Amino acid sequence: MSVYKSILPANEYENWIKNWEKMEHRTGPFNFFMHEGKVQTGVIFHFNSLRYLFSTTGVVTIKVRFGLSEPGGGRVPQFHLVLFGVDSQNTIITPYFTSSSFTHHHHYSKDVTGEGNLPRELMRLWKKSWHKNVEDGIVNKHMFFLHRTNGGFLKGYNYALKEIMDAVGSFTGTSDIHIKFGLHKYYALQEKPESELAFVHTFGLILYAGTHTDEATGSALAPNTSVRLNDTTSSPSSTDGDVIDESGYYDFSAPCPFTC
C-alpha cells in the first residue's frame, strides 16, 4: 500500500470528524460496526506508513480521533481511526494518517513476552464484551460517553509516543500497529448515596505491535500486501487462523474529552 493512500487530506478529515460527532444525537444502534455479517474488531496501521509519523521531529503525543467515512452507493458509513502527532505545545505537526485495513475476528496469538500496561485477561474481557454487543446489535451512543461529571461524547484518545515506540521496539524488524476495540464494563458513580450500583459500558482501544510468524518455525514472515482502505474484507495480516507474534498490550487511558 502506498503511504499516500494512508494520508487523509485535511478537508476529508474534517468531514469524517463531523460525521462522527453527529452520532452523539443518533437514536438506535450503530450498525456500521458490522461488515457483511462480520464484527469490526479493530484496525491495522502498517509500518511503512507510520514510520513517517514516528520520524517527525518534535512529536511527543499521538492523537487518535474517531471518524466516519461516506463510502457512497447506499452502503453504511465506515468507522475509522485517524492518527496524527502534536508537539509539546499541542500543535499539530504531521499529516493525518488513517488505517490501512480493518480486522473482523479474533486472531490466534502466541504467548506475549512483552509486559505492556494491560493484563492479558483484562484485554480479553474487553474484546469479548465488544464482540458480543456488536453481534447482538446493541452498540449505541451511550457506549461512547464518558460516565462521570462533565463527561461527554468520545472523540478519541491520546497516547504518548514513547509507549507506542516501546510496543514497536519489541521486534528487531518491522511490525504493524494493531488497535483493537473493547468495551470497559464498570460501576457508574452513584449520584445519590441511596442509589443502587449500576453497570455502564464505555468504548476503549487496545494497542499492540504484531508481526506475522510461521507457525512451524516461529520465524517472522515478510510483510503482506494490505487491502484497499475502503475494502471491508480482512487484510492478509488478519486472516482467520493467522499466527501473530505480539508485543505486550497497551491501554488508551487518556480520553478526549478531558485530554483534547
Image (tube, grey):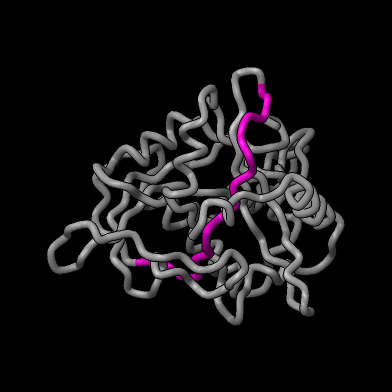
Q: Which residue is painted at 33% across and 59% down in the image? A: 223
Task: Choose between 235 and 137: the one closer to the eye.
Answer: 235
Q: Position of residue 9 (x, y in %)?
A: 71, 48
Res 213 quadrant in image? bottom left
Q: Which residues are magenta?
A: 90-107
Q: Position of residue 2 (x, y in %)?
A: 51, 56
Which residue appears farthest toward the left when viewing the image?
Answer: 217
Task: Choose between 185 and 213: the one closer to the eye.
Answer: 213
* Total tally of numbered discs in the picture: 0
Q: Main secondary structure of the magenta part?
A: loop
Indicate whether residue 173 is drawn in magenta. Answer: no
Determine whether 247 is above or below 219 in the image.
Answer: above
Task: Choose between 177 and 23: the one closer to the eye.
Answer: 177
251 vs 91, left or right, is left
Which residue appears farthest toward the right when viewing the image?
Answer: 25
Q: Which residue is painted at 59% across and 47% down in the image? A: 97
Q: Position of residue 24 (x, y in %)?
A: 82, 53
Determine whether 101 is above or below 52 in the image.
Answer: below
Indicate whether residue 96 is drawn in magenta. Answer: yes
Quarter the C terminus occupies: top right
Q: Which residue is painted at 63% across and 29% down in the image? A: 93
91 vs 152, left or right, is left
Q: Which residue is painted at 80% across and 68% down in the image? A: 28
Which residue appears farthest toward the top when viewing the image?
Answer: 89
200 vs 107, left or right, is right
Res 33 quadrant in image? bottom right
Q: Position of residue 251 (x, y in %)?
A: 48, 42
Residue 126 visible in the shown view: no
